[in-house]
Amino acid sequence: MTEPTVLPAAATPDRLMDQLARAAAAYYRQFAAMAAESGLTLMQGKTLSLLREPKSMRSLAELLACDASNITGIVDRLETRGLVRREVSPADRRIKNVLLTEEGEQAVRRIRARVSAGLTGLERLSAEERSSLQDLLDRVFPDAAG
Amino acid sequence: MTEPTVLPAAATPDRLMDQLARAAAAYYRQFAAMAAESGLTLMQGKTLSLLREPKSMRSLAELLACDASNITGIVDRLETRGLVRREVSPADRRIKNVLLTEEGEQAVRRIRARVSAGLTGLERLSAEERSSLQDLLDRVFPDAAG
DNA sequence: TATTGTTATACTCTATAACTATA
DNA sequence: TATAGTTATAGAGTATAACAATA
């Protein structure tokens, strides 16, 4: 039943899949907890994080991988709290661009800083290892929207 | 304003954070899509995936990072569909252990296979690179539950 | 007393379908 | 006609608080 010296017993496809699942779960657990400290849900935090540049309702729906009708409510709630605002596009009056307010930018910076500080495992990696991890993730998830 | 030859412009902490966010988003986008093909929500798929061994309602809540009261409804819906069943623990009659049925195990295998097949980026990595990625993720997310 | 699981409640997220206003 | 955004609706996930059963 034992396999003497075949492989280091480490990197089976299954174990890598498990590790990817665990990593994704751990990342979102941390992100959601830090968003909650600012009184925001996971989706609200994700939406704010996508608004480094203004984005239309439609493109937010695509980036958040949900139906466009959901974005109305999510942006409504963020707008009520003064974190974003809508702006009709001059080029195409059907389109509404969503922008961060100053308060929204502060919230994004706060969440990002806390998530970063909370991922203590990153500090244990050397600069080379961080670079390597980034390169590998970039190749596994090339077109990934974030 | 330009910084001539300081760094290769690659692995800033911010860019690594962004890449982690994108990777986690891409993983769950894929997982949710494959769970949906089996008529399951993301949380239902995650719950099934955690049941390689039976788990109490309480420990499911911890692993899924949500309040225990939510697990009742999630497990109710999975039980109605015949994918799991509850079993009172003989050792402590307060505890209910949740087990996969045969049909539930099939669903897990189906989802896992499709997620794996959908992550085409993994195939582009050599065995060494996959091992390296797994090792790095293991160190960044050491205690990660999955 | 403390813990496990459930119920009740209110809010958020979600997809679907139908609608409006623009193009 | 086609697209962007909204509304209405029903189902699912979420935290909080209160509860019964068991330890």
Image (tube, coloured by chain):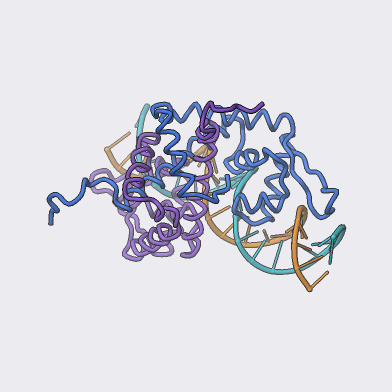
Chain colours: A purple, B blue, C orange, D cyan
Q: Quadrant of the N terminus of chain B?
A: bottom left
Q: Quadrant of the C terminus of chain B?
A: top right
Q: Position of residue B85 (x, y in %)?
A: 77, 39
Residue situated in front as seen by the camera: B122 or B108: B122
Residue visible at 68% across and 50% down in the picture: B71
Q: Position of residue B50 (x, y in %)?
A: 64, 42
Residue situated in front as seen by the camera: A82 or B8: B8
Q: Position of residue B93 (x, y in %)?
A: 84, 53
Q: Position of residue B16 (x, y in %)?
A: 35, 48
* B1 left or right, relative to B32: left
* C17 left or right, relative to A110: right
**Which quadrant of the structure image shows residue B23?**
top left
Residue situated in front as seen by the camera: A106 or B46: B46
In this rendering, the answer to whether A134 lies above or below A74 is: above
Residue visible at 36% across and 45% down in the picture: A129
* A54 left or right, relative to A8: left
